[in-house]
Image (cartoon, rainbow, N blue to C red):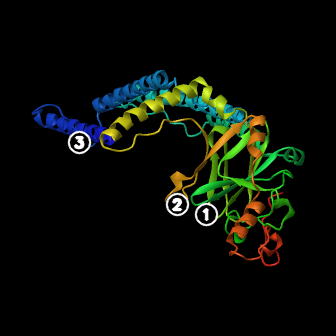
Amino acid sequence: MTTLLILIVVVLLGVAVWQLTKIFELTQVGANVNDTQVANDNDNKVNGYLMFAFLIFIYITTIWCVVYYGKFPLMSDSASEHGLLVDNLMIISFILIFIVQTITQALLHYFAFKYHGRTGQKALYFADNNKLEVIWSSIPAVVLAGLILYGLYAWNDIMFVSKEQEQESIVIELYAKQFGWEARYSGKDNVLGKANVRYIEGVNNLGVDLSDPNAQDDFSSQELHIPKGKRIVFKMRSQDVLHSAYMPHFRAQMNCVPGMVTQFSFIPSVTTAEMREKPNMVEKVANINAIRVKKSEELVKNGKTALDPYTFDFLLLCNKICGTSHYNMQMKIVVDTPEDYKKWLADKQTIVSLYAASKTTEAPAGSAMPATVDTTKTAKPEAMASVSLSK
């Protein structure tokens, strides 16, 4: 709201200055005022000086931003091994853009100042100049080709996962739906069982084909735990609309498309505990909590509940506007040490066992319902196709 008010004030001040200049012109009785629509030498000279002044303003603003905002890290919190490659590509792009923008803006405004229109002066016109065409076409082409090749190399290095690598990786499904995430782990066999939205029933909210042998050790979690230093292969599905699995600190993003399985993989390089101890993160958390303390004081005065202190966590977000509660679609990611990850796995129940237990509790009192459920009757492969996530 404050920003909007400042913007309105600036606009009104601009209108006021413009009106004052009009009044000043009207008061210049008998003065040599150019009231035609054709610019004279004085008009061109003033515009030339204004262009040069604007160039100075641009550079002063740039220097001020670098000094004032330079303390904030731009691309320095990557938590995956390929993240450094992505960050380097972004930094190189920023540097090239900055250099080109600095040079071109300087030439543009300086030439507008130096060669402003004068009576009797004619511009030198080139009908054709092959040398200039080659220069200003080849230089951008070479630079862009280099960036594109670097980008393709980075993309292939990130996206290509051989069969051998996948066999040695941890395979996890990220299941998206309005408005939340759920993770399904492939269990000891490291192969996800087949799934289809038509199999969704009761606790089987991921639509796992419970008759598939590969699904017998699959288990789900509302919190994503992954070990440091181990490649994670994510298989992604969507139940309803287009979502996008976005993990900013891992420089990872992939669309989740209804009716198909997409994939992304990376190797976590920083645990959650290690990220929380980094100086930049400690300072960031302290600044956020200082703001929350001030906000909490206002809330308490108004009889409302104070805000909880902020603690850093990696997050899985949705980067597509998927509906009214899109902003709320996030899941906590915990990067553990290998030892802590094994401890976390220890007490996990499989989807099959949870489904069987739910069916047992649904049985009426005194019935002869067995303690287990024949999962081959919960799916009908002949009537519907499952989505295989093992490929």
Secondary structure type for disc 2: loop
Three-letter amino acid code at the position of disc 1 = Val
User: Which residue occupies the foreground of this view, 135 or 369?
Assistant: 369
- Observer-nearest of 314 and 337: 337
Asked whether, in this view, residue 163 is left or right of residue 252, the answer is right
Q: Is residue 1 left or right of residue 231?
A: left
Q: Residue at x 16, y 35 (%)?
A: 25
Select label 3 or label 2 by which is in front. 2
Q: Which residue is identified by label 3?
A: 36
In what quadrant of the picture does the C terminus appear? bottom right
Residue 13: x and y, percent?
24, 37
Categorize mark 2 by other alpha carbons within 10 Å: few (<14), some (14-19), many (20+).
Answer: few
Q: How many other residues sit within 10 Å of disc 1, few (<14), some (14-19) or many (≥20)?
A: some
Observer-nearest residue: 110 or 114? 110
Labels 2 and 1: the sequence-earlier one: 1
Q: Which badge, 3 or 2, is on the more N-terminal residue?
A: 3
Decide: is 380 above or below 85: below
Which circle's residue, 3 or 1, is located before the other in the chain?
A: 3
Residue holding disc 2: 323
Q: Amino acid at mark 3?
A: Thr
CA gap between label 3 and label 2 equals 55 Å
Give the percent coordinates (x, y) of residue 104. 52, 30
Q: Quadrant of residue 133?
A: top right
Question: CB atoms at circles 3 and 2 under 8 Å apart?
Answer: no
Q: Are marks 2 and 1 in contact (CB under 8 Å)?
A: yes
User: Which amino acid is tagged 2?
Assistant: Gly
- Is residue 180 among the parts visible in the rendering? yes
Q: Which residue is mark 1?
A: 241
Q: Residue at the location (31% across, 29% down)?
A: 46
**In the image, residue 295 above or below residue 348:** above
